[in-house]
Image: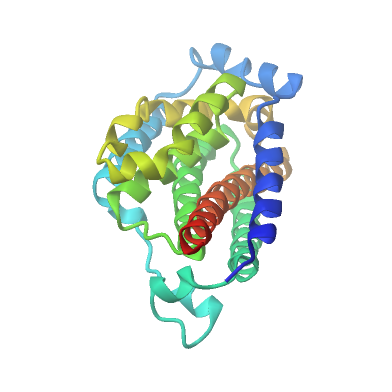
Amino acid sequence: MDSADFLKSELRKIEKWEKDQKGLWFWEKIGRLPFVLLDKLTPKSIQEKLGTAIDELGGYIQTGGQYLINEDGILKKFDRDVVSFNQVQAMPISKMDAVAEQIRNSRTNMATVQGATTGIGGIFTLAIDIPLLIGMSLKVLQEVALCYGYDPREKSERIFIVKCLQFASSDIVGKKAILDELAAFDEEKQNGQVFSQLQGWREVVMTYRDNFGWKKLFQMIPIAGIIFGAFVNKSLIGDVAETGIMLYRKRRILERMHQLERAY
């Protein structure tokens, strides 16, 4: 079991990260402006894809849909003898971190290739890219959840995952509000009130689109979009994975600290 001093030290690191996330670079703020203008120019095909992504996200919350992953591959990354969540939950935090970092590196590399591929066709393949990115984001967050011993097959965990997705794509005010909600997530879960926390999840898809801003605007240029698409997708999936690692890590650390307090 991790020591109390270690857990407190790691918790302080996460709290510092949370504080840093409440700041938003100026260019990120103005980066959303292009889509205010592009709304009037966005092809119907992209609007339809966004609508499909919204429906799919709702289906994911309810049932997991096509995005629910098989946990066996993640469990094998710990040890060949690890076959259950109970075993993962007993692992040292450092081991959980190591597997989660493997997942982040693997998925960001995959996102880089995907962004380059969908950047070839400019605005015509952007319609494909946005739903793919949302699907990849959901999957990497599920994998991170498994790394820290949480089961994304549970509806409450799928809601936590969508909250992580909201956090990664929110502005300063949104991040603060979501952190406040997540601070009481496990307590609300025990009280059966967790479902009331999830509000405005449909906005996740549109916020995701808006957050691409100028970066995705450049991807609309055929061929040149390969470079920008690869960079943007790698950055976005990296941010989502980092958010999942930090927020799930915090939950696991707090649970360990509570266990130590009860033991004494």
Which of the image's four quarters has the N terminus? Answer: bottom right
Query: In the image, is 210 to the left or to the right of 216?
Result: left
Residue 248 lies, with reference to residue 55, above or below; the image says: below
**Residue 58 quadrant:** top left
Q: What percent of the width, then of the height, locates residue 96? A: 58, 67
Query: In the image, is 200 to the left or to the right of 40?
Result: left
Residue shown at 61% from the left, 22% from the top = 172
Q: What percent of the width, then of the height, locates residue 254? A: 53, 51
Q: What percent of the width, then of the height, locates residue 199? A: 35, 26
Residue shown at 43% from the left, 37% from the top = 184
Q: What percent of the width, then of the height, locates residue 206? A: 45, 26
Residue 127 lies, with reference to residue 10, above or below; the image says: above
Q: Is residue 72 visible?
A: no
Residue 156 lies, with reference to residue 183, above or below; the image says: below
Residue 124 lies, with reference to residue 150, above or below; the image says: above
In this figure, which colouring scheme has been used for the structure? rainbow
Query: In the image, is 49 to the left or to the right of 23?
Result: left
- Given the current orientation, which residue lies at the most extreme bottom position? 81
The image shows a total of numbered marks equal to 0
Q: Is residue 50 visible?
A: yes
**Residue 91 quadrant:** bottom right
